[in-house]
Amino acid sequence: MEPEGPKGQLIRVTIFGQTYTLRSRSQPGEVEALARQVDALMDSIASGTGQTEVGRVAVLACLHLADRLRALESELAALKERVDSKSREFSSLLEDLAKQD
């Protein structure tokens, strides 16, 4: 690993049998944990589909992750709407209480 500079530090990880050197401002342990997750996902996809070509497995992993991201974005939007709705409800209740005083 290289000392951290303005652009981050170099971190070496192995994903699906290939070594990559990444530059990141994140903690090395965080980057390594993400790499392990991607490696496990790609291994799972390869064993489930019989695919061994890195490029194909990587594309399938990207599609899987994009689907998860879309689902999480949808959940987050629904959560924000519920929070906004409750916030408006509480605000209305507080206004009603203030009028009673």
Image (cartoon, rainbow, N blue to C red):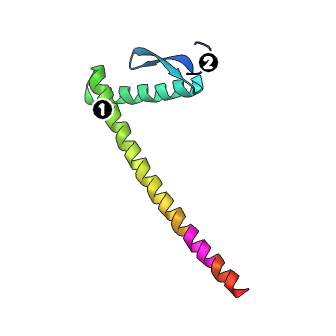
Please identify the dominant SS of the magenta region.
Answer: helix
Q: Quadrant of residue 26?
A: top right
**Location of residue 88 with respect to 46 vertically, above or below:** below
**Type of the residue with mark 1:** Leu
Q: Is residue 75 magenta?
A: no
**Type of the residue with mark 2:** Glu
Left/right of residue 86 with respect to residue 56 in the rendered view: right
Q: Secondary structure at mark 1?
A: helix
Rendered location of residue 95, percent (x, y): 64, 79
Q: Nearer the viewer, residue 81 or 42?
A: 81
Residue lying at 45% horizontally and 56% vertically, measured from the top left:
77
Q: Residues within 10 Å of mark 2 (few under 14, many from 20)?
A: few
Q: Which quarter of the figure is the C terminus placed in?
A: bottom right
Segment tinted magenta in the rendering: 87-93
Q: Which residue is mark 2?
A: 4
**Are discs 1 and 2 less than 8 Å apart at CB?**
no
Residue lying at 44% horizontally and 16% vertically, measured from the top left:
20
Rendered location of residue 30, percent (x, y): 56, 28
Q: Which residue is mark 1?
A: 60
